[in-house]
Image (spheres, rainbow, N blue to C red):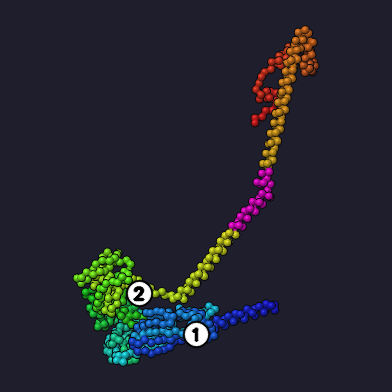
Amino acid sequence: MKKLGILLTAIVLVLAVNITAFAAFAPKLQFSDPTANVGEEFKVTMKVKAPGAKLEKGKIMLNYDPAYLEFTGGDNAQGGAGKISVTGDSSLGKEEWAFTLKFKALSPGTTTITVDKDTLEIYDDAQNLAEVTPGQSAITINGDAGASINANLASLKTSPGTITPEFAPEITEYSTIVGGECNKLTVSAKTADNNAKMVITGNSDLQIGDNTVTCQITAADGTTTKTYTIHVTKQEGEVDYGDSAGGILQANVNGVDYEVAATFDETMLPEGFLAQTVNYKNQSVLAGVNPETGLTLMYLIGSDGSGDFFIYDAATDQWAPYATINTTEKTVTVVPMGSDVTVPEGFAETTLELNGKKVRGWIWSEDLDQEYCMVYGMNADGEKSFYRYDMKEKTIQRFFSNPVVTDTLNEEQFLEAANKYNELLKDYQLRGYLLIGIGIVAAILLIALIIVLITSRGGGDNGGNGGGKIRDGRNAQADEERLAAAREKRAREREALKERRERAARADDEAEERYMRGIENPEDDYTQVIPRQEIRRAQQRQAPVNEAQLQQKLAREVMKTTEPEHKPAKDAFENDGFETFDI
């Protein structure tokens, strides 16, 4: 019991040490909070601190608002479009990692850089996953010295319902009533200054009773702000909205849900579009229609309250953000190509006519319509390169053979993934070897079992195959012995037959001699040859013997003896009482 208690105590201590060590690995993420002006580049410092621990590797994903910030680079960092991936390893330090991230300020206002907790991974040298306490960076961006301080709205509408009083830029307090089916109020607003920023809050998850929706406007200078407030009363049951739309229309664009605004400020429509009421999902909504192209624009509101125009195709029920591409006029001069310049693969040389002049160019070998060509030219900055020319739309752009594909994994992440793959491959190979070994052992055991079964059956049952073999041997030996006996018997029979024939021959000679003597005194000899058996039979019957009959019978016997009948050997054996064998 004493030893058992010591063992349990040791186990508890080891577990306590491990739990303590694991719980102690809780590094902190700290950020700097810089201030910058619009257009300036600035730095954000991010530190990972783990006093008393040994940082081994980590991956940190950051989120930022691309409307305010443009990511330009950083230490062990890559990203863009609102996301940054930062990686660290032990080469940066054991207890602290420091990263410098570079940004460009795009718009005035206040924004943040946050940590994506779902993808955050930091490990110590024992491969323990850290319980990180993440921070964030608060960035203040000031406008230009001459930036506008206009923080007014140019228009404000809601759906469903209407606001009271009628909108005016100087009025900041409004009210509206919605029914019990309305859970979110769609707010359509436009800032008076296009460089101003707007944030809408409180317009979702409306409750029965009073609700407050705010539109906060930040002027282009980044400091001037103004707030418009909408007091929303949600009543139980239905509400008559009059001519305004009464239902919430939904739209999904590239996996993001939006609400379709029933109305918007018509002055917001792009050039070439006219305000027109259209039917969408059995409801009338305001849209912008281009008479020349037939395109239809609708105003969609995002979950953050911001809105924008989207192209809607009623035939396919598909949406796309409304975006145009504007190009500035540029001049490219076709120049001779040096001998050190290589034509991209897949192009065939041809003669092109540009502005009435024939120049050297190349076309894609598989382009049957020949709508594009490639020329070698120089731009206004004196840079020479291949240019791709669209012969249909008369546009030109610099040619690139292969787009640059940026791998989402850096070298360290790739090596880590490769090592994990190799480890898994080794595990699967080991499992394969084990399965092969088990199969071989099973086969050997099966063969051994079969041998044991065969051996046990043969040894335990004399009537089995072993006994049968012994009997077969004994039967064969018996057959040989019988055959030898038959051969020996036949030899004796042949000797006896030979001896009988010799005796018969001697008897013939003696009978002939007696016959010759019998002429002088035949009775003496014939009486001597009277068969004793006949006399014995007669005596038994007690009948007189007829000597004359006996003499005649004796003569017939003698004649049979002197003229023997020749028979086949087999018949002779059978008549003489011998056994015959067919071999």
Q: Is residue 189 above or below residue 506?
A: below
* Marked residue nearer the N-terminal end (2 or 1): 1
Disc number placed over residue 254 in the picture, else none: 2
Label 1, residues with CA under 10 Å away: few <14, some 14-19, many ≥20: some
Q: Quadrant of residue 318?
A: bottom left
Q: Residue type at mark 2?
A: Asn
Disc number placed over residue 310 in the picture, else none: none
Image point 22% across, 69% down: which residue? 358
Image point 56% across, 82% down: which residue? 21
Q: Is residue 462 magenta?
A: yes
Q: CA distance from mark 2 to mark 1?
A: 40 Å
Residue range in magenta is: 442-470
Q: Nearer the viewer, residue 97 or 263?
A: 97
Q: Is residue 38 magenta?
A: no
Q: Quadrant of residue 558?
A: top right
Taking the image as shown, residue 537 lies to the left or right of residue 65, namely right
Q: Which residue is mark 1?
A: 96
Q: Nearer the viewer, residue 109 or 192?
A: 109
Q: Residue type at mark 1?
A: Glu
Q: Position of residue 230 (x, y in %)?
A: 33, 87
* Kind of element beneath mark 1: strand
Q: Nearer the viewer, residue 219 or 311?
A: 219
Is residue 285 visible in the rendered image? The answer is no
